[in-house]
Image (tube, rainbow, N blue to C red):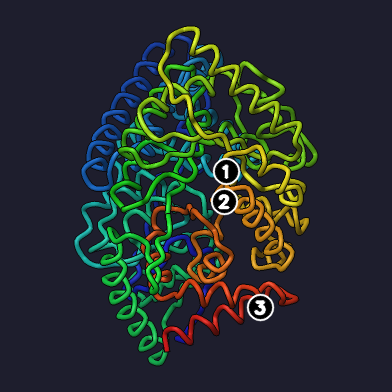
């Protein structure tokens, strides 16, 4: 049989060679009910049957949570615990009981219909993160159906022979059962980059390709596959030449992994001795603990919206304070920059009931919501300020586009400080207040802002899309989205130089900061603080260790004069090759 290449979305890097094993978890939508209706006298018994299924499902998930804590840590166990909470959601499980009682439908039909109703609602949302939570809902529904019908879930943890798993999809509760020594890689027909399954695959170190489409249907058990999670490629029946190439890539991967491990707890220092501050981007308290363990110099971005998005109601001051305090204490005196609520755009929050917008990225979002709903902002600022008594906490406002917005946000912070002073509540009186630079107007006016703010943090993810008029969530224009575009680089230069002129510091918390290829350019521009996903820290440390800061400063002036993003990238690739040659 000829070699066949199947393309998908690479969500976890690595190359693996192995035999295919097809896996079919229990689907919530695809199981037809055994009966369409029940009699009124059967309602009590059918409700009891559903309740027993719920209890069995909860018990199974709780055991999985405890096992995941031991293997992957608290933060990844929280993904499964989140599924467990679905069972107690007042809008989910009770809706099944009502269908049984009011419409006289059997329990399995009630489960299927309620599950699909909520999964469809999530899939209709603009936010990719929320769309992919539909898989979590269907996982719960499938487990309830399996329990109702007397089945038991397939235990992927029981696999003993090395395989490459092939499936339509893998739920998070499937993925946490995977043993990387046995499940070498996996490929799924559907799925996306921000799914919990993708997150867990990266945590487990299992190469994964999702969204491979219908071509995957032809794969049969026992066939030889090569999965390249970095390239988003699954190769079926690989030819000898490609097998040799894949084996070489595996060996290079092992060598690189060993080399990167040696950088974990080293400080980030250039070849000529310049110390660079590398921080981590986080969204939860356990991620702060993981960042500290990974050797981060601090938290450059605490995305507080995840505290809000994971709740059916808005968290109050005490709940927020507890989370922010834990993050500050986890970093043990290292800086923790807490960003106020950045909701809207690609992030939806049902508890706020935000209006649907034609162009949400240019609409009612981030600081605009905070200033329009002052009580929401006030509560969060009070919680952050209280947490500042327990560590080196700084406050950052997102999507500032004008001096008026900055001054109103700063005024809200000062009002919260005054309230706490009057109440005798302890907080850091000298807490720094900064802004994200993600709107071109702010970068253009960086000199004016630098006179008043304590620091800048450049958010390249939004700065690129606003500068280049490219929707970063739109695959049709994805090739136009590039942080090496000369216009973006010019704005970054302006911000860093404005900060330096006024004795302030400038950081970066967008994706560019975690790209080793960008390291010579950012070092040359004089970026003070780099914040990235925790997994990128050793890669950037390794890149910096090969660089001479003075050389990068000289080269940066040349790179800034180039006319296209491709030219910049080619020059950086050539520069890296010279260093490694």
* Quadrant of the drawing holding the N terminus: bottom left
Q: Is residue 38 shown to the viewer in this render?
A: no
Residues marked 1 and 2 touching at CB (< 8 Å): yes
- At x 78%, y 42%, the residue is 359
Between 560 and 93, the one nearer to me in the picture: 560
**Residue density around tag 2, few if under 14, some if 14–19, many if 20 or more, within 10 Å:** many
SS at badge 3: helix
Instruction: Give the distance between the C-alpha atoms of the residues marked 1 and 3, in whole angstroms.
Output: 27 Å
**Vertical comparison of 508 with 127: above or below:** below
What is the quadrant of residue 525 in the picture?
A: bottom right
Mark found first going from the N terminus, 1 or 2: 1
Q: Is residue 128 left or right of residue 237?
A: right
- At x 61%, y 76%, the residue is 569
The percent position of residue 286, horizontal first and vertical second, equals 34, 39
Residue 79 numbered mark, or none: none
Give the residue at the far top of this rendering: 423
**Residue density around tag 1, few if under 14, some if 14–19, many if 20 or more, within 10 Å:** many
Q: Which residue is mark 3?
A: 558
Q: Which residue is mark 2?
A: 506
SS at badge 1: strand
* Quadrant of the drawing holding the C terminus: bottom left
Q: Which residue is mark 1?
A: 455
């Amino acid at each position: 049989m000829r070699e066949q290449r199947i393309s998908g979305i690479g969500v976890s890097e690595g190359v693996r060679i192995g035999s295919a094993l097809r896996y079919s978890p229990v689907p919530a939508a695809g199981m037809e009910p055994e009966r369409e209706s029940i009699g009124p006298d059967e309602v009590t018994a059918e409700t009891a049957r559903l309740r027993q299924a719920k209890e069995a499902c909860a018990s199974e998930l709780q055991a999985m949570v405890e096992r995941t804590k031991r293997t992957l840590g608290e933060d990844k166990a929280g993904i499964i615990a989140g599924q467990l909470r679905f069972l107690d959601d007042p809008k989910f499980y009770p809706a099944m009981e009502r269908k049984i009682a009011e419409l006289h439908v059997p329990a399995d039909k009630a489960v299927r219909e309620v599950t699909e109703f909520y999964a469809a609602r999530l899939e209709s949302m603009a936010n990719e993160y929320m769309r992919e939570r539909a898989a979590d809902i269907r996982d719960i529904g499938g487990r309830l159906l399996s329990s109702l019908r007397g089945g038991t879930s397939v235990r992927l943890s029981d696999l003993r022979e090395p395989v490459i798993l092939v499936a339509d999809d893998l739920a998070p509760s499937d993925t946490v059962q995977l043993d990387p020594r046995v499940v070498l890689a996996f490929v799924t027909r559907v799925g996306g980059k921000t799914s919990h399954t993708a997150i867990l695959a990266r945590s487990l170190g299992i190469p994964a390709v999702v969204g491979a489409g219908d071509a995957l249907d032809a794969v049969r058990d026992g066939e030889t596959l090569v999965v390249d999670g970095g390239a988003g490629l699954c190769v079926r029946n690989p030819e000898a030449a490609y097998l040799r190439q894949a084996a070489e890539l595996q060996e290079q991967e092992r060598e690189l992994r060993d080399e990167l491990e040696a950088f974990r707890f080293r400080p980030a220092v250039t070849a000529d001795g310049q110390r660079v501050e590398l921080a981590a981007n986080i969204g939860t308290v356990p991620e702060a603990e993981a960042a500290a363990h990974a050797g981060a110099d601090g938290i450059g971005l605490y995305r507080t919206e995840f505290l809000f998005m994971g709740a059916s109601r808005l968290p109050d001051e005490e709940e927020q304070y507890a989370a922010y305090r834990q993050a500050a204490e986890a970093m043990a005196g290292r800086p923790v920059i807490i960003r106020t609520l950045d909701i809207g755009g690609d992030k939806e929050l049902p508890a706020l009931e935000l209006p649907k917008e034609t162009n949400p990225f240019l609409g009612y979002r981030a600081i605009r919501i905070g200033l329009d709903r002052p009580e929401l902002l006030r509560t969060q600022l009070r919680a952050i300020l209280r947490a500042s008594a327990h560590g080196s906490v700084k406050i950052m406002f997102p999507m500032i586009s004008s001096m008026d917005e900055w001054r109103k946000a700063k005024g809200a912070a000062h009002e919260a400080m005054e309230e706490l002073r009057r109440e005798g509540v302890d907080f850091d009186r000298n807490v720094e207040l900064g802004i994200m630079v993600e709107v071109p107007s702010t970068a253009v006016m960086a000199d004016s802002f630098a006179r008043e703010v304590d620091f800048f943090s450049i958010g390249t993810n939004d700065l690129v899309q606003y500068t280049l008029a490219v929707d970063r969530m739109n695959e049709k224009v994805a090739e136009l989205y590039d942080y090496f575009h000369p216009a973006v680089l010019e704005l970054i230069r302006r911000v860093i130089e404005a900060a330096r002129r006024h004795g302030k510091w400038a950081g970066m918390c967008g994706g560019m900061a975690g790209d080793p290829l960008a390291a010579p350019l950012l070092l040359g521009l004089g970026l003070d603080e780099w914040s990235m996903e925790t997994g990128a820290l050793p890669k950037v440390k390794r890149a910096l260790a090969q660089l001479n800061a003075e050389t990068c400063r000289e080269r940066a002036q040349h790179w800034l004069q180039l006319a296209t993003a491709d030219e910049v990238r080619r020059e950086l690739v050539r520069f890296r090759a010279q260093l490694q040659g």
